[in-house]
Amino acid sequence: MAKGKAVSSKGPKVSAIKLRNISQTKASNKRKKATGKAKNKSSSTQVGKNASGGDGNLGNLGSDGEDVEEEVVPDDMVDDDHMEYLETMGQNISFVTDTLDEKKEERNEKKRRKDDQDEVADYEELPRKQFRKMETEDRKYLHLLPIKGDRGIIPQMMEKTESDEEDVIEQEEDKEENVEKKSAVKSTTLPETLSEVELLKLKKETLARRKMQIAKLSIRVMDSPQEALSSLKALRVMLNEEDPQVAVTVRKLVMLSLCEVFKDIAPGYHIRTRTDKETQQKMKKDVKQMVEWEEGLVRQYQLYLQHMEDIIKACTSKKKAQGVSVQNKLPMKVLQSLMEVAVKCMCELLVSLMHFNFRTNIMSVIVPLMDSYNSDIADLCCDTVKKVFKQDRQGDSTMEVVKLITGMVKSKAFSVQSKVLETFLALKIKMVFLTYFRILKKNRQSVLLPSVLEGLAKFSHLINVEFFNDLITVLRELVESGNLSYRETLHCMVTAFQILSNQGGVLNIDPLRFYTHLYANMLHLHAGQDTDDTTNALECIDIMLNKRRKQVSMQRAFAFLKRLCTLSLQLLPNSTLGALAASREFLKVFPKTDMLLQIEETQGGGMYLPELQEPEHCNAHTTALWELHHLNRHYHPHVRRYAAHLLRKAPSEGAGSLPPALDRKSPSQLSQEFDPSEMNFNPSIPGPGKGGKNMKPFSRLGSLVQESMRKLEQDVCGDAM
């Protein structure tokens, strides 16, 4: 820029502050120049050509060359050193001109520096203006280092690419991570002289700060997800908390917080990865921002899942996961506590974000944990799989889970917990029969057999008719083998009759052996056995007799009704009510069986043979249901009422009818409602009244017991003598 040349209005834009600084600099330079001229003029008038006068002192000359009178200072008032200095300076007059030349050179140097700065400033402003004119929404330019040529400084630029932008973003993110790590290291530095109380206080304060930070980041992300991707990353980075005092707690809180954040901000669709061709296509600004946010969200979600998977692998696999054991070196107990939180989060994400990305990856982690040695984790994973089966409407997720479970069962040679296959009972589609048939064929003594039989009974209406004959044969062999428990035997019979009651009715299959086996094993039930076994037996009787009434003979109906009443004497009150309800169904389905209620009269010839295992030949029609008279004096009020109801031939209204609370419930419902497993009577038994009226039967019973004990002692003493 030329000296003293003003900046034109058409030149590059300059800020007001810079213009003010330039004007102040110019004014200062002018003042310095004026001051320098005045000094030169005064020095030239004071210093003449004949600088040296008489006595070696400077002469005093007037304007006309005449001497000017001046006050003479006495010699005794000036020191010798001062006089010597003045004489020397008077003889050497060049020090004045040297000082002036130095100041002049200094001013010229400042001027050159100022001109260089102005040129740089003009250059700095010029390319930005040019680039702004050239930039569009689709094309952006990257500033490069300039080149100095013959014509001056030449600016350089190149068009920006997506890779350049990603590199810049990654560099910024790395800087943020380094800053966070440095701050974390600083925060973990503790004084060595703190007491336990001070350490506890410091731990609480640190934990409170971390909680506040987690809350702020979570709220910021959930308020504006597309604008707070950096906050989401900062929250995820807190999964690697290194402060030993609060590391475990902070990591758990961050995992749970991220789980809720992703459940809230994840879109309701699967985010597809862009192809190479799609990445090169031009997009609008809004569309590009949305795509970049989706990719960033998927990336953070993937890193979050990988972190939890590493924790789970560190606890379940023999070879520790590199991402956990090597870096953090946490003890196994701490890892197990982190694993429980990680499994819980992954289960929540699988159920809530079944449509979102990495669904298969989450399933591949959860399915092996269904057979975990930790019962809590196994139950949680099994419940999650059941929820997936129930909530999946399209069937894709269900298919993936079933394939994973089938592969796991096969790889472990069917040695898995029964709860794994019990999850199939929540299915609504037919895709598990291959696993069921494989277990029945290769491993009939597996602990999974009850689950397999229960599943076959539930999905029997979906089985192809071609398999019925072979399946019934396998079930009959299992029942007659004697290797099954009572519950497994009941499951076999229920499965067989479920098959026969649906499409199997068209086949010529004789189920007589199943009837015989059930009749022979009914009396194995007792009050000390599980209530579920009684419920399964009552369900089996209902399927085998009531629902197949046309295929059941009267002799078989008499035998099973008599066996039910005999069984009711040795059960708990709730099971007794279920047996009486099943007997009532017999009386309705087979009306001729009411002849067993007549005690004084006998029908037909022969004698009842209860020890005979064949229901068709035990002559049950010649006996009576005398068990109801005993139950009519039962301590449970509902049992007494039900027995009296049956003795009156089960009337639907009038005297002897049941209240609606008992009349409208099935045997299994009555057994569950009045279950005394919680040590509570339903209804409650009233306490003793005033005067001990209610205690008379018990006192009489006590006297009888005492009398019997006295007689027993006398007999024992008499035999000893």
Image (cartoon, grey):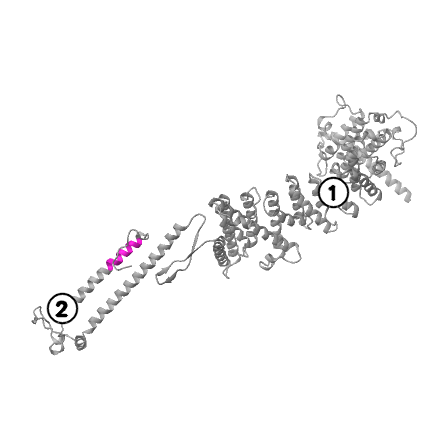
Residue that protrudes farthest toward the top in the picture = 654
Q: Quadrant of residue 689?
A: top right
> Considering depth in this image, is 407 or 72 the residue closer to the camera?
407
Residue 277 included in the magenta stretch of the image = no
- Residue drawn at (72%, 37%) of the image: 676
The residue labelled by disc 2 is 45
Check whether the beta carbons of the residues at disc 2 and disc 1 lie within 8 A of each other.
no
Q: Amino acid at mark 2?
A: Thr
Identify the element where label 2 is drawn: helix
For the question of whether residue 538 can be seen, the reply is no
Give the quarter of the figure containing the N terminus.
bottom left
Q: Quadrant of residue 122?
A: bottom left
Q: Amino acid at mark 1?
A: Phe
Which numbered marker is on residue 433?
A: 1
Residue that protrudes farthest toward the front in the picture = 150
Identify the magenta region.
17-28
